[in-house]
Image (spheres, grey):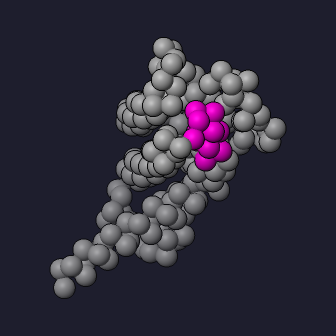
Amino acid sequence: MAARSKNKGIDNRDNILKNARRILQKKGGQNTSLADIARAAGISKGTLYYYYSSKADLIYDITQDHMKSITATLLKTVEEKADTENATDIMYLVYETVIKAKARGRLHLYLLQEAVLGNAELQKRFQDAYSEWFDMITTGLKRVLKERTDVEILAHVFLTSLTGGIIQQLIGNKSLPLKPMAQWLTGNS
């Protein structure tokens, strides 16, 4: 019975996070209350408060899950393709995976906005995630661009262009030249 209670707790937490992400993506953080999230999750406000006593606590967990998801996606893309694809194709795949994920992009932008507006905990989480992404991208680029000596600079430019690409996509710029950008960055233009 203890295992069932524990699983129910995990199910409730996952349900809360899933619905909170959906509501935040749709309405934004300022227009979303814990009551909205409880209603969307089909639970009482008391149950929600049992797991999350504040919206900030909930946002921290959403941020953690969001960053883990993007990190896993990036890692999988780089690891699967590093030995068989060239650097341009890998960069293009990463651009496509991260920038074109509209729902995830909205959540990323909302969380980033909260960090920029002074949420120190979110700032730290973004710094940690970006540091991990930078290391991952640098390692992947070193594997496929053995002749380049400026791989760390290239990784910084690539990571920065990913964030900018997410914003461009969200404001409706559908004409980002992702393939030519990847070609230019790798020197294959």
Q: Quadrant of residue 175?
A: top right
Viewer-closest of 7 and 97: 97
Viewer-closest of 21 and 53: 21
* Above/below status of 27 relative to 39: above
Residue 21 lies, in percent from the top left, at: 53, 57
Residue 23 lies, in percent from the top left, at: 58, 59
Q: Quadrant of residue 85?
A: top right
Report the number of discs: 0
Tell me if residue 131 can be seen: yes
Q: Is residue 76 left or right of residue 163?
A: left
Q: State which quarter of the image contains the N terminus.
A: bottom left
Residue 106 lies, in percent from the top left, at: 62, 47
Q: Is residue 152 left or right of residue 99?
A: left
Viewer-closest of 170 and 51: 170
Q: State which quarter of the image contains the C terminus.
A: top right
* Above/below status of 153 relative to 27: above
Q: Is residue 172 left or right of residue 127?
A: right
Tell me if residue 66 can be seen: no
Residue 93 lies, in percent from the top left, at: 62, 43
Looking at the image, which residue sits at the far right? 175
Q: Residue at x 47, y 19 (%)?
A: 152
Q: Residue at x 37, y 73 (%)?
A: 11
Looking at the image, which residue sits at the far left? 2
86 magenta-colored:
yes
Q: Main secondary structure of the magenta part?
A: helix
Looking at the image, which residue sits at the far top? 149
Q: Is residue 151 left or right of residue 46?
A: right
Instruction: Point out the stretch of residues depicted in magenta.
Output: 85-97
Q: Residue at x 49, y 76 (%)?
A: 42
Q: Residue at x 41, y 66 (%)?
A: 14
23 magenta-colored:
no
